[in-house]
Image (cartoon, helix red, strand yellow):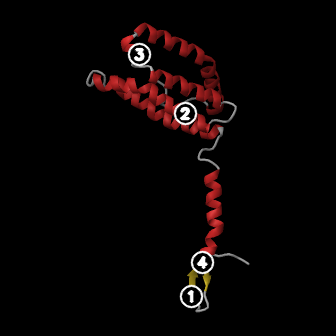
Amino acid sequence: MTLHMFRHSASGRWRFSPLGLAPIAAAALLLAGCGGQTRSAAAYCSYFYGEGSTLRNRYIQADQNFKRDPLQTIATLLASPGDLASFFHQLSLRAPEDIAPDVERMSDAFQKEADTEGDALSDPLGALGSGLINGLTTLPAEERVNAFTEQNCGPPPAGASS
């Protein structure tokens, strides 16, 4: 028995058959159950240079507008640890399994920075020390992420370096 979404009726007209939707519905559920992101070097590199370029351009624009709009520049810079935490988290979802934990470690480090930004006002030395320790403990993961990116994605696209 062949299932079709439309079938010929006794009256000679084509009519909709809900039974024909079963294979389509099953395929949709199967695809939905597979998760959203593909883990591959290609998916990683595409996101890294695509979304990374968007973030980079935002920071360049803020720097260029500093004299004209210093408050907006400061707001952009204060938001950057949270932006970078989100960027690296999304990147980790696309990263191959062997590098994903290091990319997630980068996300966690930026999130920690974002979460403790307010501490710098009340305890600047403590915040500086915490940031230094956070940076030092993240260094091995950062080095592996940089090496993976250079090896698998190549150099940044033309015009991306300053």
Residue sitting at x 37%, y 27%: 76
Q: Amino acid at mark 2?
A: His
Q: Secondary structure at mark 3?
A: helix
Rendered image: mark on residue 89: 2
Tag 3: residue type?
Asp
Q: Is residue 83 left or right of residue 98?
A: left
Question: Residues under labels 1 and 3: Cα distance?
Answer: 73 Å
Residue 100 showing in the rendered view: yes
Q: Are marks 4 and 1 in contact (CB under 8 Å)?
A: no
Question: Are the residues tagged 4 and 2 within 8 Å (C-beta)?
Answer: no
- Residue furthest bottom as drawn: 11
**Type of the residue with mark 4:** Ser
Discs 3/2, front:
3
Badge 4 density bin: few <14, some 14–19, many ≥20, Cα 10 Å = some
Residue at 61%, 24% in the rendered image: 146
Q: State the SS at label 1.
A: loop
Can you tell which mark lies on residue 13? 1
Q: In the picture shown, does residue 66 fall above or below 125?
A: below
Cα separation, mark 3 vs mark 4, equals 63 Å
Q: Quadrant of residue 7?
A: bottom right
Residue on which disc 4 sits: 17
Total labels: the figure holds 4
**Label 3 – label 2 distance at C-alpha:** 24 Å
Any mark on residue 119, and which?
Answer: 3
Q: Position of residue 93 (x, y in %)?
A: 60, 38
Q: Amino acid at mark 1?
A: Arg
Q: Position of residue 104 (x, y in %)?
A: 59, 29
Mark with earlier residue (1, 3): 1
Q: Quadrant of residue 126?
A: top left
